[in-house]
Image (cartoon, rainbow, N blue to C red):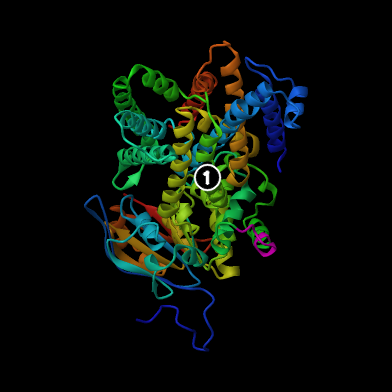
Amino acid sequence: MTRPLALVLMLLLGATVLSLNLGSFRITPGELLQTAAGRGDANQELVLYRIRLPRLTMAVLVGIGLATAGAVLQGVTRNSLADPGILGLTAGAGLAVILLIYLQERGLAVPPGIRPVVAFAGAGLAAAVTFLAARRHGVVLPSQLLLAGIAVNAGLSAVTLVLSMRLDRKLYDQAVTWLAGTLVGRDWQQVLSLLPWLIVLLPILWARSRPLDILGLGDGAATGLGVDVRGERAWLLLAAVGLAGSSVALAGGIGFVGLLGPHLARRLVGPQHGRMLPLAACLGALLVVSADIVARNLLRPVELPVGIVVGAIGAPYFLYLLARAGREGEI
Amino acid sequence: MRSPDSPAPDGREPVARGLRAEGLSFTYRDDLVLKALDIEIPAGRITAIIGANGSGKSTVLKNMARLLKPSAGAVYLDGQAIHRLPTRLVAQQLAVLPQAPQAPDGLKVRELVRYGRHPWQGGMRPLSKQDEAKVDEAIALANLEDLAHRPVGSLSGGQRQRAWIGLALAQDSPLLLLDEPTTSLDLAHQFEVLTLLERLNRERGKTVVLVLHDINHASRYAHRVVALHEGRVVASGPPREVLTADNLRTVYGIEVRLIEDPVTGGLLCLPVG
């Protein structure tokens, strides 16, 4: 294990404890241990097991999913500013989920666990549109991806807004909060509907870390080294879309995690995905867990959507990256 | 069809393998860039492809390295159509260095060179001891020992080109294709890179194909020269046969005078108008 990874895991552990402690109902570390040992009172058990722990788990999983998806998207597109939000994946998943809520309101019966699947389809469609729009003469231009993503984002968000305004008042409020990214009221059932996506997709992506490295050398060099560039890129993209879509389905439009996690990871351990992906995943988890602590406690008892807190950290970093990339002529 | 490198008379398998284009045409946005080319790359030799800007010389190289797919005709590697072979098997036989390649920020020289083992070990397994030995060998051959732990981005142009050649060497393929390996290098670094390629050919028997801008480089380092003009082969053969005033007038549209090089005994080309 690299030293940065060990450090980030320790920070994550600290954030975990803090996240379980803090809130409108405080549980001290001592009480935490007592409750964990089965000697807590009913309130403590309720808050810990039914509210905070599933929410914390969800924060960790969503952070891992979004950061890994971002790292893979950046690798595949060779564009360091690519992430699920910027390429339109989040907006696609968002529209699909709002559409599902809308149809449910009109009496459509759907099986449980369908939401991540629908979000995956939405994210996939949005990704397909983005990539098709960035194609020139059969080649996807990394330089065009950001522009295409911004256009797809704007279009999809507009449709989503119109659609959500047709929901009734209560559902509309829910939808708006969810679109901004929220972890309020996440329960174990929702955790369980996200978990399989990560269990299947993360090992696949980690196993493909070397082809992902080699794609970073450019299409010509990668083909020369025996990587099936089109096939490899298609599978990696599909897996990234799956991670992003399922994460968005459960936690809404939390942006910037896919940008921040991988970037910090690259700075700490370099660009090779074998080391970078696990670190990016843990940084993503740390980011979402920390942002959730702030979101729950900053204006207590009012809760901020966690996506807004992440955005408040992420937006300045993104601007910094843009400025730096602009100087180096990367865009 | 006879393979250009069918077994030598004594019946042993040849060490190096040949590469051949037959009726190779390539279309880009409705433009016929390559027009039914026949090119034979002799095994164990250095072949230079020359031509004016836009003559299609890089396109030929990319087609022969299966980076581009011909619109008609085919490229044969050891007698088999290269575009139908699994790309990883081709990579074991043929390494290609694209023009002005870019390494990701922060990637170190040794990490780059290690990617050269990818065709031999697939996607998942870590590098074996044997792979690491090949990496060490490639680093030594490309004279990269002192740079191995430096980021590729921090190197000078010549050093960077050596790092990429190190990657191609770690691939351990009998064929090495390079697209303008000396472009944007200063005189000393051009010399360094070409001398390295010459040494690899002489000592390791590598078949080298390179796209060159400088006719004098082609004259000095290549055993064979293929001269292209507007997507067709104007002439191919030993430098003395190809580098004539007539051919160069066709290829570059200028008058040249060719004189004996007092140092190498080859030809020197002087434009006169």
The front one of A112 and A100 is: A112
Please state, as top left, top right, bottom left or bottom right, where the C terminus of chain A lies in the image. Answer: top left
Taking B239 as reference, is A287 left or right?
right
Image coordinates for residue B155, horizontal then vertical, percent:
60, 42
Does residue A83 show up?
A: no
Mark 1: few, some, or many residues within 10 Å (few <14, many ≥20)?
Answer: few
Write the residue at 59% across / 50% down.
B112
User: Vertical placement of B195 versus B99: above or below?
Assistant: below
Which stretch did the figure color magenta?
A: B125-132
Using the rendered image of the protein, determine whether residue B135 is visible from the camera's viewpoint: yes
Q: Quadrant of the N terminus of chain A?
A: top right
Most distant residue in the left direction: B30
Question: Looking at numbered disc 1 in the image, what kind of residue is underneath it?
Answer: Pro
Query: Is A200 on the left-hand or right-hand side of B131?
Result: left
User: Badge 1 is on which residue?
Assistant: A196
Looking at the picture, tell me which residue is in the foreground, A80 or B21: A80
B205 shown above or below B150: below
Residue B251 in the image: x percent, y percent?
30, 57
| Residue most extreme to the bottom | B10
Residue A162 figure quarter: top left
Where residue A126 sits, quadrant-wise, is top left
Q: Which of the pair B226/B84 is nearer the observer? A: B84
Percent coordinates x, y for residue A121 in the rendering: 37, 41
Q: Is residue B130 within the magenta segment?
A: yes
- Residue A92 highlighted magenta (yes or no): no
Q: Is residue A9 left or right of residue A186?
A: right
Q: Secondary structure under badge 1?
A: helix
Q: From the top left corner, tell me how far across and down residue A243 is, in percent.
A: 48, 40
